[in-house]
Image (cartoon, rainbow, N blue to C red):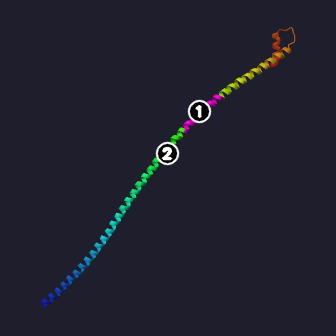
Amino acid sequence: QQLRLTRSTSSALIEQYINDCRTVGDTLQVNVQRINDDIGTMLSTCSRSVGQILSITTNISQQMYILNEKVRGVLSLAFQNFHTIFEELNTIYNQFQTELDHELRVLIDMLAVEIKNDENQCEKNIEEEILIKIKTCFQEMLISFKPTQQSLWDDLHTFFTQRFS
């Protein structure tokens, strides 16, 4: 009887243990299922997020490519315009330089002619003044000569000595 009682108690304990194990197993299974569902939801959300991120990244990449092409086009056009403007300015500068050189040569030639004319005129004026002075000098000399017994050379010497001393 003791054996039966022990067996019965052991059997009840084993059954209780088995029931407890089943309960723990069921709870574990429920918890594992919840964790599995949560992980699935999280992965699904993450997958959607990754998909959205990939989509957004693709859109950004396309927009950057379009922007890059537009900027490249604008810069290319700007460079062409700059190059054209630079060439036009260079042409204008060369024309201006050529015209300026020509005008300066004409001006220099005109000034040279005027200076030469002024020089010739000054020479004429100086020559005329000298001739007038010489004429005046000779007239004064002739007036100052007194008929003397000295020679003409002596009279000239006396005249010039008085005149220039």
Give the residue at mark 2: 81
Instruction: Based on the picture, tell me whether residue 74 belongs to the magenta stretch.
Output: no
Q: Position of residue 72 (x, y in %)?
A: 44, 50
The part of the image, by quadrant, that contains residue 141 is: top right
Q: Is residue 49 above or below residue 80?
A: below
Query: In the rendered view of the protein, which quadrant contains the N terminus?
Result: bottom left
Q: Is residue 136 above or below residue 66?
A: above
Q: Nearer the viewer, mark 2 or mark 1?
A: 2
Q: Are marks 2 and 1 in contact (CB under 8 Å)?
A: no
**In the visual, does 68 lie left or right of 145?**
left
Give the magenta-colored segment's residue range: 92-110
The CA distance from mark 2 to mark 1 is 30 Å
Q: Element at badge 1?
A: helix
Give the residue at mark 1: 101
Q: Position of residue 119 (x, y in %)?
A: 70, 24
At horizontal 68% and vertical 27% (from top left) the residue drawn is 115
Mark 2 nearby-residue class (10 Å; few <14, some 14–19, many ≥20) = few
Q: Is residue 158 above or below residue 113?
A: above
At horizontal 57% and vertical 35% (from top left) the residue drawn is 97
Query: In the rendered view of the protein, which quadrant contains the C terminus?
Result: top right
